[in-house]
Amino acid sequence: MLIKTDGIVIKESSYSEKDKLMTVLTRDLGVIRAFAKGSKSFKHKNFSATQILNYSEFVFLAKNGIYTLREASLKNTFLEIRDSFESLIIAQYICESVLHLVRENMESNDILRLVLNSVYALTKNKFNKRIIKSVFEIKLLSILGYQLDCNKCKLCKKILEYSQYFHTSGFICENCFQELNFYERTQCIKTNTSVLNAITYITDAPCGSMFSFSLSDKNLKTLSLLTQKYIITHTERAMKTLKIYEEYFRLSKKI
C-alpha cells in the first residue's frame, strides 16, 4: 500500500553502502522508520529529502509493517539553522525528544506543527533560543497529556498559594516541600510568579505567539532547568543532546 504524508526527518543512519534508514516524524503516521534506497548518494533524487531536519512530502510503500521510501518532494531545509551551534544542538535535542516520546500511529499533526514552528524559530534571531527550548518542552508534553498544573500541589492536591517548588513532575506546596528528605529537597527547583506566569502563557498560547514573551536571565535559567527536568522525567533517560547543550552553556559561561 502506498501512503502519502509529509514529515520531518529526525534521525538518519547508514543501512548499507548505498541505502540509509531514516526516522521521520510524519503528520499521519506518528514516528516511523523507513528504508531509503540509494539515498546516500548525493546524485540520488531523494538525497536532500532524506537529510536530518529536512521537511518533505513523502510517499512510502507500506508492507508487513515495513516502510520503504518511494518518492519525496522537499519542502524546507532550514539551512540557516546550521549557522549557529546553539540552534543546531537545540534542533537535534528536539528531534531526540520526539524520538523517545512519539510512537508509530500516534496522532501527530499538532506535534509536527510544534516541531516545524520550533525549528523555524531557531533559524531566526527574533526569539531567545532558551525560550524556544522551554516552549517546545512544555508544549510537547502538554500535547501528549502531561500538562503542568500550576494551581494544585502535585502531592497533597491542595490549592497552591504563594510558595511553590517544582518536584520531579509537578509543583508542590511549602508543607510538602518541608516533608521531603534532604536529598529530595535539593532536587527541587524554587519558582516564582514570573516563571509560573510564563508557564501558563506557554500552555495557553497558540503556535503563532507561543515564543512572544520575555524573562530576566535568572528567571529564564529557572524556567529552562524546570522544563528540562520535566521532560527527562517522562523520557526516563538522560538525552545525549541535552548533555551537549548543557556543556555548551557551561563553556560559554551562560549558566
Image (cartoon, helix red, strand yellow):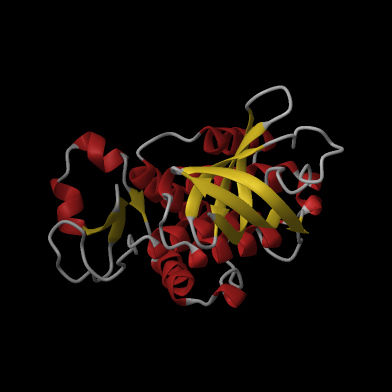
Instruction: Give whichever of 154, 255 is nearer the camera.
Output: 154
Q: Position of residue 169 (x, y in %)?
A: 30, 51
Viewer-closest of 106 and 84? 106
The answer, for residue 54, to whether it is visible in the render is: no
Q: Residue at x 60, y 51 (%)?
A: 60
Q: Position of residue 249 (x, y in %)?
A: 62, 39
Residue at 34% over, 44% down? 233
Left or right? Give the position of 189 relative to 177.
right
Q: Considering depth in this image, is 125 or 71 the residue closer to the camera? A: 71
Which residue ends up furthest to the top in the rendered image?
17
Where in the figure is residue 104, as x and y percent of width and height? Answer: 43, 50
* 226 with respect to 119 (left or right): left
- The residue under the point 81% across, 53% down is 80
Visible in this render: residue 146?
A: yes
Q: 252 or 141, which lies in front?
A: 141
Locate the C terminus and report the quarter of the image it occupies.
top right
* Image quadrant where residue 65 sits: top left
- Spot occupied by residue 71 in the image (x, y as percentages of width and height): 71, 52
State whether residue 7 is above or below residue 34: below
Against 70, residue 138 (above or below) is below
